[in-house]
Image: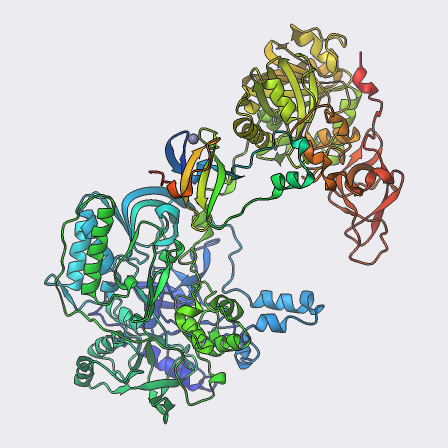
Amino acid sequence: MLLIHCPYCVDTLPELEFAYAGEAHIARPANPMSQSDEEWRDFLFIRSNPRGLHAERWRHIHGCGRFFNALRDTVSDKFSVTYKAGRPRPDLEKAVQVPK
Amino acid sequence: MSPLRVQAGGLGADQIQQIQLGGKMSDLRISSRGRVDHARPVRFSFDGKSYEGRQGDTVASALLANGVHLVGRSFKYHRPRGIVTAGSEEPNALIGTSRGPGQFEPNTRATMQEVYDGLTTESQNKWPSLKFDVGAINDRLYMLFSAGFYYKTFMWPKSFWDKVYEPFIRRAAGLGRSPTELDPDHYASRYLHCDVLIVGSGPAGLAAALTSARTGASVVVVDEQSEMGGTLLSEPSPMIEDKSAWVWLASALDELAGLPNVRLMNRTTAIGYYHQNMVGLCQKLTDHLSEVPADAPRERLWRVRAGQVILAQGAIERPMVFDGNDRPGVMMAGAAQTFLNRFGVKVGDRPVILTSHDSAWHTAFDLADAGCKVAAIVDTRTDIPPALMQAAMSRQIEVLTGHTATATGGRSRVKSIRVNPVRGGTVGTARTISCDAVLMCGGWTPSLHLFSHTKGSLEWDAKAKAYLPGHKTEAVHIAGAGRGLWGIAAALEDGAKAGADALRDLGRKAGPATYAVTGDRTGTGITQKELPTDRNPSSARAFVDFQNDVTAKDIRLAVREGMRSIEHVKRYTTNGMATDQGKLSNMNGLTIASDALGKDIPQVGLTTFRPPYTPTTFGALAGYHKGSHFEVTRKTPIDSWATENGAAFEPVALWRRAWYFPKSGEDMHKAVSRECRATRASLGIFDASTLGKIEVSGPDAVEFMNRMYTNPWAKLSPGKCRYGLLLGEDGFIRDDGVIGRIRDDLFHVTTTTGGAARVLNMMEDYLQTEWPDLQVWLTSTTEEWATIAINGPNARKLLAPLVERQDMSDAAFPHMSVAECTVAGFPSRLFRISFTGELGFEVNVPARHGRALWEKLMAAGKPYDICPYGTETMHVLRAEKGYIIIGQDTDGTVTPEDAGIGWAIGKSKPDFVGKRSLARPDIVAKGRKQLVGLLTENPKDVLVEGAQIVLDPKQAKPMKMIGHVTSAYWSEALGRSIAMAVVEGGFDRMGDTLHIPTADGGSQAAKVTGCVFYDPAGDRLKVE
Ligand SMILES: [Zn+2]
């Protein structure tokens, strides 16, 4: 079971308290009706699915309830960093390990 | 057993031999040796026969002491099999154990099960008896059952699959039999945090524990065996710190047991190593006890989060692969040494050692010193350390170096071994040596299963000819034989270093620890593919995987037939896929496959070990989560009334809901018909408390509602409510419910019973991450309110006298209104809405008043014959009106237009969740499945929900299915059945007749209609 750092609670807690919520940084278009069918399809369904670092959303659902973002390695499953929703994706080279 | 009482004519030579051996059973037990309590005999049974063991024995050691080697039949060929090892890696000696009804356990390792008075055990995979097994015919059909047997044999003809092949495979598959009764035992679970977790209590693990524990760090030591000590239990002769090994062991354990920061856990298996140093432990608590304390859990599952983990799991001995290596009496040399030194049991009187490693020579010496006549030491190597040669000579043991083994004799017990010299790659003339045990050692494999669970890399060490730990992914240290080290001194030193390293990584400092060892039995050896033979190798039963009956020939055949990766070879042959996960077979299989492929071992790759390390009971994994604790049962405030009044219940999501209220003599159909009649005729009362409720509040609440729901909300004034429809961004229906505007900035949202948590999560998601600028607060209020629905023409007559602070007239409180008022003196949010088509109200009161209000309404409703109804009647009444149930009439691929509720979409709104998707090409395409009504040709036929719909029931199978029935009921109001269905292009099929094939091969015809079956004009809502 993973330990996950909630950037709002500023605490590292068991995975049981959290729920996964899909890939991060996929903003809903400001005006969906102006989207072409292809653009809208990409927004709905097309995901990066990388081997390696993946920016993804988690919710501290049995804690503070906040959605936040994380960089996690899809090979090792390990978290590199977690950060608040709305913040930009951290530079991979500068991504620092979250202290326990 | 006396030979005189046996019909000699019915026995073969080897059975007579076995009886003779059995007659000498007392000689096999050496009272001066071993750690068992020779003063405490224990009686247990195996296959109905009573045997005597000693306190501290395993079933395996006790049977061996009685001269019993034959303990099971093999999986595929039903070959007689004996005990091979002395540990949890045992592939053959799998037995059924039982303590009482429901307490039968198949596939227990006889080498791990401790004997106790009254223990009942049985062999497996045999019929009618272990010695005369009909399935052994498979052994004669050896050529047929080769690698890929299932894939090849059961391919053709296709029609044979159902009737012939599948039943055959099902009968043949699986070892042992499953228990059928409920398990009466209970199982516990615990969490544990520690600084250092040490897996394995041999010399490496103990040294690591002593080093760690002396600093005050919290230390947990686990060992799967009944006793701590690991290899020291089998090696009493070396001296450690001027003490004999067992005296040193006792003092080390004493020291650890005396420290408050140390927890020693025996009979505890580390079953899995998970992320961030979480290790799962399964602790066996009662399986070794004759008298089980009342209420004691049978096993306890521990989830340990360790700062540092030290793996000191030792190494596992590799079998030799040669013809007849599976005959009972052929076993691992190290196991024989364990049986001798730990249990005081000779596995035979005349053993032959077959080895390629120095370690087995010491087994020979120990056995000779215990009085065995060691027939020979056969070593595949030519270069043997002179000290070993001298030690053999001084014991007058014949030594055959540079030899291979090419066959064994005997049936249910080995009685001879055929050996040949190998010179310059040529196998020379055979010689047969008579014996009663063959003790083999084909080298040692570091035990790195748990390390593999962490995705730690294993790197091939050409010198050690073994995979050793490479890159680590966790805070873990490996010590001792797991790193390819050999000998007690090396293990102690390495364990102390691992302890110090772990402490360093924790920011602590360990004191130095050195151990002086004399008489250490260091040594080296080689590993090899199957042994060379002068016979036809393709008819050799040279087993690699004993448990799955995989031979060297199978592995070579798999390579010949095109398998290149070891993962493919594994699946094609099933090598390493049995319950032992190939602890004995993987490396031999890999060596043979790499030879067949002409590649080096590291180029062929390695299969992956996965948890659990050894088979684990479902009970341990389930823990407390069984029976009524399996999941929570949510009950409404009115549940107790329903119970007292004889309701039948049904589960809905996690809730239990009153299903119907049968009166005496009524079945469900009669009760529901009565409840429907009563509600439509006068007055029904329904507990709707499970409806999900969310309060949406704040200055931007209306804007938020406009964005989330399809409907327009800006013009809905406080005091009014509206049906709300929620889509996913993909345009498909997610949820619905009536939503009341309490104030400008406060909406009372209701959701489906099962959808409440999902809807709140979805709302929070948009609010937090897409529209964080909106000033809105979301609060789950599902359990704050008890909700009682009152429906029927007399609903207002019941309620009006009880309501204060709200004019209940139709003009002042029309359909789709909401008010804050009091009902029967309770503060209330009162809705005028209907899910039945009748005049209807829903009264929400604080949950604590739910039952009191219900009882007041029941009392006040007497003059109107008020009728409590359950979810079944609710379903019938809503279906008569064509009101959909999300998740029943929709399935995640249904749009508002598909469901015929396009009217709920605010077409002039610029945006809402899912709006853009309603213009997607697939959503506007023709031929989508649409929700329609169905009226069966025979009005008495009630269709089956989920049944498929076809145009022509006489067409050939497989038929073209154009939809399915989503709801079907008997309508008491209409005196006939009704149904709803999703049908391709359904709106264009009005009046058409469709067909619904039935399970008995028949078919029911039904006409397509609209969904509103009852009161289509809605007049019944308008009761004055
Ligand atoms: Zn949090």
Q: Residue B809, how many percent across, how many down?
A: 75, 8
Q: Position of residue B921 (x, y in %)?
A: 74, 41
Q: Which percent across, then down, holds residue B657?
A: 62, 31
When the figure is inspected, residue B338 is found, relative to residue B744, above or below; the finding is below
Quadrant location of residue B714? top right
For residue B981, which quarter of the picture?
top right
Direction from residue B608 to residue B38 in the image, left or right: left
Residue at 52 percent across and 59 percent down: it is B178
Asked if B376 appears above or below A65 in the picture, the reply is below
B950 versus B698 height, above or below: below
Left or right: residue B204 versus residue B462 is: left
Task: State whether residue B262 is above or below residue B64.
Answer: above
> Does the image show residue B914?
no
**Ligand 1 quadrant assignment:** top left
Q: Nearer the viewer, residue B891 or B223?
A: B891
Q: Quadrant of the N terminus of chain B?
A: bottom left
Q: Looking at the image, can residue B961 be seen?
A: yes
